[in-house]
Amino acid sequence: MIPLNAGQKMVAFIDSFLICLYRITGDPILDYFLGTFLLSFLTVVVGEFTISIGFRANKPYLDQLNNDMQKMSSLSREAQRLGDEEGYKACNKEGNDAFGRLFFHRFGLAAASLWPVFLALAWMQSRFHGIDFPLAWPLSVVFRNGAGYVFTFIPLYILCRILFKYMRPWLPYFRGVQKLLDAGK
Amino acid sequence: MKREVKWMLRLAAALAVFSFLVAGPAYSQDAATGQATVAAAGNPAPVGNDLGLQGKLGKAIAKAPAGQGKGEIDVNAPRGAFGIPGAPKINYVLAVLWAIWVGWIFSTVGAFGGIMAGVGHMTIYGLGDYAKGFKDTVPELNKTLTDSIRTSNQFLVGLSALISTINYLKSKRLAWPLGIALGLGSIAGAIFIPMLTGGKISFRQYQGWFGVFVFVVGFVLLYELTPRGQKGKKAAKAAAQAFEKSVKEKRDIGNQGVALKEFGFTRSTFTFFGTDFRFNPIWAFFGGAVIAAISSFLGVGGGFLYVPYLTSIVGAPMYVVAGTSAMAVLVSMITSIAGYITVAKAGMDWTLIGIELVGVFVGSMIGPRTQKYIPDKWLKILFIVLALYVGLKYFSQGFFGHSWVP
């Protein structure tokens, strides 16, 4: 038997818990989609919790970057309106710097919400790789081999994200985060 | 005392980065595979089966010679990266530490992060050296692993674009007419490259071109430090400040958004805030295609290229450039990643990406707190040195077979 590496051991450790999500009704197709939906929801919750930590910690910095960019954006618009080409280019250039920092800092927050997705995909790869669902025309023209675990997980994840957005104001802890987000708007 | 602390921090950061670059590959590899042992004489028998690995990776593994030498698969060895027996066991602690560094760069410099992520995949985790080992024995495996490395790079870049695009859409800061033209071009570029190059580019070729790109980035940063570059930057800052002072009228930006005024294949106009902006959709399409092709091929560079293209060549204002370029990067990355996974059948190590995202998050949290201790100029100097070192190393390794620097 080939020994497992650290990543595979980690995936195996949570396997016993996650597979329970796929054994609820007894019907294999229904269980697959229900289990994937529950797994997606779990990744949303864990990701939202992680991002809330980052958001709380770095809110003043994000607000500053946003303000800098807004200021330069407003000025460049004004310069354009007044026909000041030099001022327009200068404000754009300054805005570029603030934009770069803000763009990539947001990625850090994005990473916070998305890291559970990839661990979930790693687990699904170990269980469902090679299991493809045939698709109806015209999707079958593009996805000739059918849809695998990645392309079944992603739509359900998006659905869970939308559901969570509406549930957030009523969930403990997350309703506090929602208030913080609303205060910043 | 405060000045000494600042210099100690700067020196520690530089030493940490260079020690990673030099020692990282050694820590990331298993002792058996880390040594470049000569393959057994004669023609060892092929592995003969895919060892449970799917797609092109499994097929390439089946053709690989079985054995313990370089370019061979030891079927009894522990599974490493991508589930391949004997492949480098990626040290996840090292992966997190490097990802923290990438996240730190993302949040402090606002550029160069994708390149550092690529360096991690290629050098720090030892995947590049492992892929190169199969250049002569199983070129197909070399190229399949290269595709997996390219796709891994693109995931990190694409994810940042995803979140940014959603945010800019919500705040109506997307010039959608320009974005559509750019996006269609980027789709073309991002489909074309995986089809044309998927499974055909050896790791050395990829490494060489990555090195060339890093050189270009390094020289752009170097130019910004020269008296001429500094003069331009100071002039821009002064002009912006002067203009800010001269603005007397305050306007309510309210809910004003982007509206398409006229559309033509060679000239289109959109307005926002009462101002017209004209652009040539054909130029936007071709610009998007070229930039997407470059970033799809390398796995990095979308943001670095789209933003100056939109501000300098298309002349779009910053207000919409940010969101529009994020959308173009997102479209091209989704297309490219889907292409590599479905057309080129690149295998993915999801656990590695998940762990990297944890590190990037931590690094992004640390960045704002250290920024006040490290001036921009010193950061730029550090990255110029890194860019020239990495560029030279990869360029020489890729195109000449050996590194010109240690």
Image (tube, grey):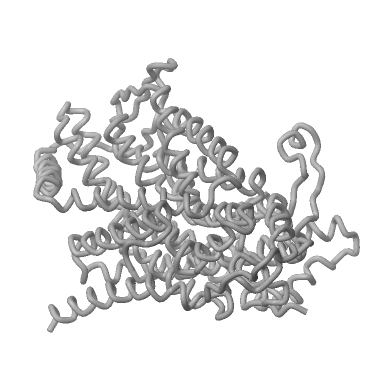
Q: Please tell me whether residue A49 is drawn above or below residue B181 in the rendered image.
A: below
Between residues A96 and B87, which one lies in front from this camera angle? B87
State which quadrant residue A59 falls in.
Answer: bottom left
Say which residue appears at 50% left-offset and 52% top-offset: B154
Residue B173: x and y in percent read 39, 39
Task: Locate residue A100 relative to residue B147 in the image: left or right.
Answer: left
Q: In the orientation shown, which residue stands out farthest toward the bottom?
A: B1
Answer with left or right where residue B372 lies relative to residue B287: left
Q: How many marks?
A: 0
Specify whether residue A106 is in view.
no
Q: Is residue B145 above or below residue A49?
A: above
Q: Nearer the viewer, residue B7 or B65?
A: B65
Judge whether residue B100 can be spotted in this image.
yes
Outermost residue on the front side: it is B42
Q: Position of residue B302 (x, y in %)?
A: 41, 45
Query: The C terminus of chain B appears in which quarter of the rendering?
Result: bottom left
**Percent x, y of residue A42:** 65, 66
Quadrant in which residue B386 is drawn: bottom left
Q: Quadrant of the N terminus of chain B?
A: bottom left
Q: Which residue is found at the position 10% from the left and 43% from the top?
A: B235
Estimate the x, y position of residue B70 in percent, counting from the top left.
Answer: 59, 68
